[in-house]
Image (tube, helix red, strand yellow):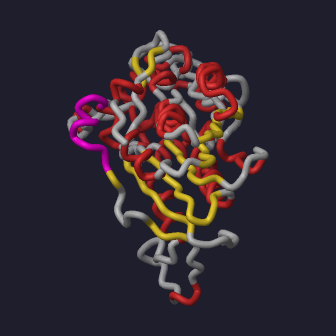
């Protein structure tokens, strides 16, 4: 089945949204026989729509914690009726939905273009807006509140570990000194603060905007994204049918490392270089469809530059069993 990007982009008053690796992920999920599929990260709805369009025998359960996603899901509900169901929740809470035994489970861990293109959401420094960054902007602390209040150890974890920022010491100290000044309340001023904290000779080594990694780190911290991914993958696999397929699309090394190690663990392979357990100590519950991550095609990258960093991994469930 061929899926055209031109047929699946969405507009919402804030630019266009292209689902990343759409054709590759739908083909991998093999929807020809129909069945119940879980879209664990509804976002702009592109993957859910493509799943529903792929076969009249496909039903989709979609999840997203973003209140705006629920509004977009209403359009699919109007069109597809009982074949589509939406839950407004974080994908780490899959166990709370009543539907089980999925033929396929899909996760796309990237931010949607809707989130990035709305200045008031505070995810991007391309626009000047409040430094919010919450996936669910109705609860939890904002990025601004996080930067103003957390202790230095937690701040280091966000900038150094989650943001993987080389100049993390300078950035952390700049944030601590800026508390109470108002510089941590807006996207533009925070980005400028980070950039100004890095020596000019160091700026030459950055291929991306110097504030990009710090924004990523703070966003991951306040939304507890890595914990959610670990739990979501485990719960998604638990409710996947034997013979069913799981697909996960990641956008940076921290996400992809979690997916890679989880998939290798399920497949009875060493999770990392220090994993030297004997084979009889491993429990084989799945098989990786490809041992290496699949990347977006040159054609897709030309249309949607965001897909350049995407990495897709997939596996097929071989047997039931508790994930250790």
- The residue located at (39%, 31%) in the rendering is 211
Q: Is residue 299 magenta?
A: yes
Q: Would residue 197 be seen by someone viewing this image from the given angle?
A: yes
Of 324 and 122, nearer the camera is: 324
- The residue located at (78%, 46%) in the rendering is 98
Determine the main secondary structure of the stretch shown in magenta: helix
In the image, residue 289 above or below residue 94: below
Of 191 and 259, nearer the camera is: 259
Q: Would residue 172 be seen by someone viewing this image from the given angle?
A: no
Circle count: 0
Q: Is residue 194 magenta?
A: no
Quadrant in which residue 131 is drawn: top right
In the image, residue 55 above or below residue 145: below
In the image, residue 179 above or below residue 262: above
Q: Is residue 20 left or right of residue 176?
A: left
Quadrant in which the N terminus appears: top left
Report x, y in % for residue 91: 65, 43
Quadrant in which residue 168 is drawn: top left
Quadrant in which the C terminus appears: bottom right
Q: Which region shows up in magenta?
A: 295-304
Report x, y in % for residue 230: 60, 55
Report x, y in % for residue 87: 71, 34
């Amino acid at each position: 089945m061929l899926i055209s990007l031109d047929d699946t982009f969405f507009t919402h008053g804030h630019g266009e949204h292209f689902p990343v690796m759409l054709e590759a992920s739908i083909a991998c999920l093999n929807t020809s026989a129909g069945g119940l599929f879980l879209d664990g990260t509804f976002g702009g709805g592109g993957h859910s729509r493509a799943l529903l369009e792929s076969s009249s025998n496909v039903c989709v359960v979609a999840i997203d914690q973003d209140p705006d996603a629920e509004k977009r899901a209403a359009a699919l509900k109007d069109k597809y009726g009982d074949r589509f169901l939406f839950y407004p929740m974080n994908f780490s809470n899959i166990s709370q939905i009543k539907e089980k035994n999925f033929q396929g489970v899909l996760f796309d861990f990237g931010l949607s273009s809707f989130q990035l293109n709305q200045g008031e959401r505070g995810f991007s420094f391309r626009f000047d807006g409040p430094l919010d960054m919450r996936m669910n902007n109705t609860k939890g602390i904002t990025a601004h509140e996080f930067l103003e209040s957390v202790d230095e150890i937690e701040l280091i974890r966000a900038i150094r570990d989650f943001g993987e920022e080389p100049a993390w010491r300078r950035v952390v100290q700049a944030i601590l000194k800026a508390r109470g000044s108002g510089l941590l309340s807006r996207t533009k001023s925070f980005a400028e603060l980070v950039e100004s904290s890095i020596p000019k000779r160091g700026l030459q080594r950055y291929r991306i905007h110097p504030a990009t990694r710090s924004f990523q780190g703070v966003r991951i911290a306040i939304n507890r994204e890595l914990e959610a991914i670990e739990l979501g993958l485990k719960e998604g696999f638990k409710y996947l049918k034997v013979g069913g397929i799981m697909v996960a699309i990641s956008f940076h090394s921290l996400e992809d490392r979690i997916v890679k190690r989880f998939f290798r663990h399920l497949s009875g392979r060493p999770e990392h270089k220090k994993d030297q357990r004997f084979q009889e100590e491993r429990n084989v519950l799945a098989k990786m469809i490809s041992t290496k991550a699949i990347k977006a095609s040159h054609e897709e990258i030309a249309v949607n530059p965001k897909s350049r960093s995407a990495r897709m991994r997939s596996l097929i469930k071989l047997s039931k069993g508790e994930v250790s």
